[in-house]
Image (spheres, rainbow, N blue to C red):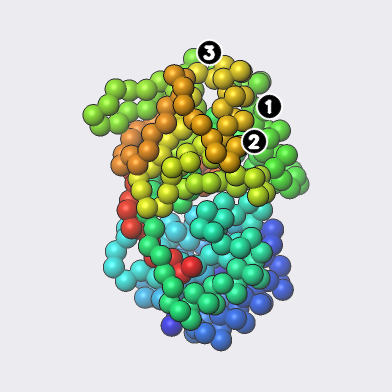
Amino acid sequence: MRALLVVNPKATATTPRVRDVLAHALASETKLDVVETDARGHATELARQAAVDGLDLVVALGGDGTVNEVVNGLLADGPVAGLPALAVVPGGSTNVFARALGLPADPVEATGDLLEALRADRRRTIGLARADERWFTFCAGLGLDATVVRRTDRRRSDGRVARPALFVTEAVTEFVTGTDRRRPALTLSRPGAPDEQLGLALVCNADPWTYFGDRPVRPCPRASFETGLDVFGLRKLGLGTTLRYVRRILSRNPRLRGRRVLSLHDVGEFTLTADQPLPFQVDGDDLGDRTSVTFRAVPRALSLLV
């Protein structure tokens, strides 16, 4: 088996020790190449070339951004036959995708699980999704959530660590000081249904999210890699309404009903539009501003070694 280990050396837990342990373990089972990324988009290029070269496995050691880049490289030409399988060893600060798959949070423990899966050829094929041209694994959004991602990235570039408190601080600040809560910013359109005016729309491909350590974040509790896309939307962003549903999203068994809520499950395609350019994110990665994004579910898109 030929394999490529893609390492993001800047990710939180990708220390030389973790990298060396993983590389040594994989080299005992595969013909392995190890490459460290050196710029944004490098992991995408490496994964795309691995698919062209017919490798059997690509292992991503890093956070959700690294995983997203690798996925976009593997699926550059779509989910065609013969693509390398993907394996993930969590090395970032949040590792939402790895946790949604049920992988251990500790990278050394995750390496042990990966070796067991490799020896047993234990695989799982999952559905993913596209936001326009970009593949994503667990979430995407246009508007408020993407603005919070952008604010958090700016704070991280100033040296702040991406701890839960940082996300909370930036979300509260943006909601209170930067959001026009009187007028819905988004329109959701889908075939066969009337348009919906929304102040917030979270697009989910997995449940739960785990931005806050072991505490679940569950805007779409029925979302899964085996179904289409789910959406949690708020029609209005009144302070009381928003706080009430934030509390529910952070509970282990959320009840997300009400006349101010839009809750969609297993949707194949829809479009979010805005009157003015708004921040756009996939898997917590800021992709700039858009006025329109079309989301599509793609079943059985990628094989994982898990």
Q: CA distance from mark 3 to mark 1?
A: 17 Å
| Image quadrant in which you'd find residue 242 | top right
Q: Residue at x 55, y 46 (%)?
A: 209
Q: Is residue 43 visible?
A: yes
Residue 157 place in picture, x, y as percent: 70, 45
Report helix, strand or loop for mark 3: loop
Which quarter of the image is occupied by the N terminus? bottom left
Q: CA distance from mark 3 to mark 2?
A: 22 Å
Q: Callout 2: few (<14), some (14-19), or many (20+) C-alpha neighbours within 10 Å?
A: some
Say which amino acid is labelled 3: Arg
Q: Nearer the viewer, residue 62 or 155?
A: 62
Residue shown at the point (43%, 56%) measured from the top left: 72
Residue receiving disc 3? 182
The numbered disc on residue 173 is: 1
Residue 169 x %, y %: 71, 33
Q: Badge 2 is on which residue? A: 151
Counting residues from the start of the chain, the first of labels 3 and 1 encountered is: 1
* The quarter of the displayed image where residue 107 is located: bottom right
Report the residue at 75% width, 45% height from top. 160
- Residue 189 lies left or right of residue 140; in this view the side is left
C-beta proximity under 8 Å, tags 3 and 1: no
Q: From mark 2 to mark 1, how far is it between C-alphas?
A: 10 Å
Question: Does residue 240 appear to the left or right of 201 in the view shown?
Answer: right
Mark 2 or 1: in front is 1
Instruction: Assess whether mark 1 and mark 2 are in contact (beta carbons under 8 angstroms).
Output: yes
Front residue of 175 and 134: 175
